[in-house]
Image (cartoon, rainbow, N blue to C red):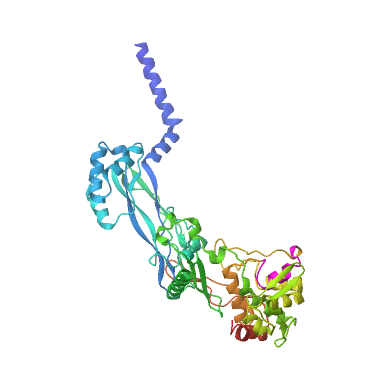
């Protein structure tokens, strides 16, 4: 009798202890089992071309998942799912068996509406659908190097998708859910849900039709020349807006994760190369501006061979006297060398930097390279002729066309642009980039017009 009384007193004490000391902890533990937070995903914004055509959008597609802890007969369930999803039953069973302790095993990803309805009609407590947003690129290979892609976690990985990820992604919402012992949703939490804020949209300066024409022309040129690769850019000389930006070979951006990173790289902005003869009009404009040569002066091009100490500068064809028009039209390295020697390294270096080489264009694209321009203290006597006709430096295709646009735009360098506007989720303009953004003057109007309209006419 004493023992029974003692046991009852101990139990009573235990109950008091649980009801007082452990009450808060146990209540919190119960709530954690009964309540959960359901993330309400935000819809990722669209990317549009300059005419409003959709080039990237998101759509909701469900994944089929299995609560493995509720499955008693794996093979039976796998066979039923296989009949509705067209996935091999062995493949489904293998996924479930590999994670028997998991409540969330994705067995089929991104099913269509018919499959979704068929899975729902099964009425299996262990089977559910998890809806998520999937990025779609309707133009497939076109604009692949501009757009970039989105990872499975919804984050932008490259290109415009990465650069404007924060604007495009939006802000996810939250909703509380009450669940039973089997973790099935039975009601909503008393806490007010927080709605998701959908992402905004991006309007590019790219014209999808000009992009298509450029890509086709580039592909033909690369194949005709039997080259390994090629790049092309179309830019408005009055605004700096990029109308097309292409790399070949290209890839289907819908399948970007399976493509090697080297193929996905946008080499128009990431890969510097020696510009060669394309650099001659840039140097010539500075020589004319500084009075180092006149428009009519005749320069002896030495019949294609000029010795400078141990170095010999050659032209592909022998030429005698040439004026500045002839030097550009015949692409004479010797003529440019003689002009470069008059300018000297300091002026040549200042010319290179003034046209933006050695600095990012600030176009707003991830991975943009600065190019390769040695500091002046590292320039030598051999740098003078080399730089004069486009060697010993590295420039990106974007830097080069930006410099040419500066000459075409009456000598005013413009900042290149890929984005025309940022819109909110409702399509209203948040920020618009319409007016040209001058960077600096690189040549007088008179010199710029002479170079672009006279010197480059017969090039």
Instruction: Decide whether residue 385 is among the magenta residues.
Output: yes
Residue drawn at point x = 72 percent, y = 64 percent: 375
Q: Give the range drawn in magenta.
A: 378-392
Residue that extends furthest to the bottom in the rendered view of this protein = 296
Residue 180, visible in the rendered structure: no
Q: Is residue 145 above or below residue 407?
A: above
Residue 65 horizontal/vertical position (percent) = 32, 46
Camera-nearest residue between 283 and 358: 283
Residue 258 horizontal/vertical position (percent) = 42, 54
Camera-nearest residue between 41 and 196: 41
Camera-nearest residue between 242 and 133: 242
Instruction: Decide whether residue 8 is among the magenta residues.
Output: no
Residue 424 horizontal/vertical position (percent) = 46, 67
Q: In this view, does 93 lie above or below 151?
A: above
Quadrant occupied by the C terminus: bottom right
Residue 5 horizontal/vertical position (percent) = 36, 15
Give the image quarter of residue 55: bottom left
Q: In this view, does 287 lie above or below 232?
A: below
> How many numbered badges does the structure rendering display?
0
Residue drawn at point x = 43 percent, y = 62 percent: 251
């Amino acid at each position: 009798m004493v023992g029974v009384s003692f046991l009852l007193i101990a139990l009573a004490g235990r109950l008091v202890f649980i009801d007082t000391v452990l009450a808060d902890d146990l209540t919190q533990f119960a709530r954690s089992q009964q309540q959960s937070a359901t993330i309400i995903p935000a819809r990722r914004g669209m990317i549009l071309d300059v005419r409003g055509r959709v080039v990237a959008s998101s759509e909701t597609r469900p994944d089929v998942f299995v609560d493995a802890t509720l499955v008693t007969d794996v093979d039976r369930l796998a066979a039923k799912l296989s009949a509705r999803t067209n996935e091999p039953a062995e493949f489904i069973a293998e996924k479930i068996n590999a994670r028997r302790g998991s409540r969330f095993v994705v067995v089929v990803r991104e099913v269509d509406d018919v499959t979704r309805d068929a899975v729902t009609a099964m009425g299996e407590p262990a089977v559910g659908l998890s809806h998520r947003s999937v990025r779609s690129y309707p133009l497939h290979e076109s604009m692949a190097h501009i757009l970039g892609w989105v990872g499975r976690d919804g984050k932008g990985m490259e290109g415009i998708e990465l650069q404007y990820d924060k604007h495009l992604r939006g802000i996810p919402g939250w909703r509380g859910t009450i669940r039973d012992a089997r973790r099935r949703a039975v009601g909503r939490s008393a806490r007010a849900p927080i709605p998701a804020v959908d992402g905004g949209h991006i309007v590019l300066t790219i014209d999808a039709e000009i992009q298509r024409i450029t890509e086709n022309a580039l592909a033909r040129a690369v194949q005709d020349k039997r080259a390994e690769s090629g790049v092309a850019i179309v830019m408005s000389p009055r605004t700096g807006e990029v109308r097309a930006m292409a790399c070949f070979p290209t890839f289907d951006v819908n399948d970007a994760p399976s493509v090697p990173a080297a193929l996905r790289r946008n080499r128009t902005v990431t890969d510097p190369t020696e510009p060669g003869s394309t650099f001659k009009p840039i140097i010539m404009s500075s020589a004319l501006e500084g009075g180092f040569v006149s428009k009519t002066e005749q320069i002896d091009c030495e019949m294609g061979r000029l010795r400078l100490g141990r170095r010999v500068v050659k032209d592909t064809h022998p030429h005698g006297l040439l004026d500045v028009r002839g030097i550009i039209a015949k692409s004479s390295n010797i003529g440019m060398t003689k002009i470069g020697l008059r300018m000297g390294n300091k002026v040549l270096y200042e010319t290179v930097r003034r046209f933006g080489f050695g600095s990012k264009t600030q176009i707003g694209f991830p991975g943009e390279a600065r190019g390769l321009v040695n500091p002046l203290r590292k320039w030598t006597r051999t740098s003078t002729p080399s730089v004069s006709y486009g060697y010993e430096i590295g420039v990106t295709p974007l830097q080069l066309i930006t410099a040419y646009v500066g000459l075409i735009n009456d000598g005013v360098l413009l900042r290149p642009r890929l984005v025309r506007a940022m819109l909110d989720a409702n399509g209203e303009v948040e920020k618009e980039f319409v007016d040209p953004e001058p960077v600096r003057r690189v040549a007088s109007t008179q010199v710029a017009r002479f170079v672009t309209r006279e010197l480059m006419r017969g090039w």
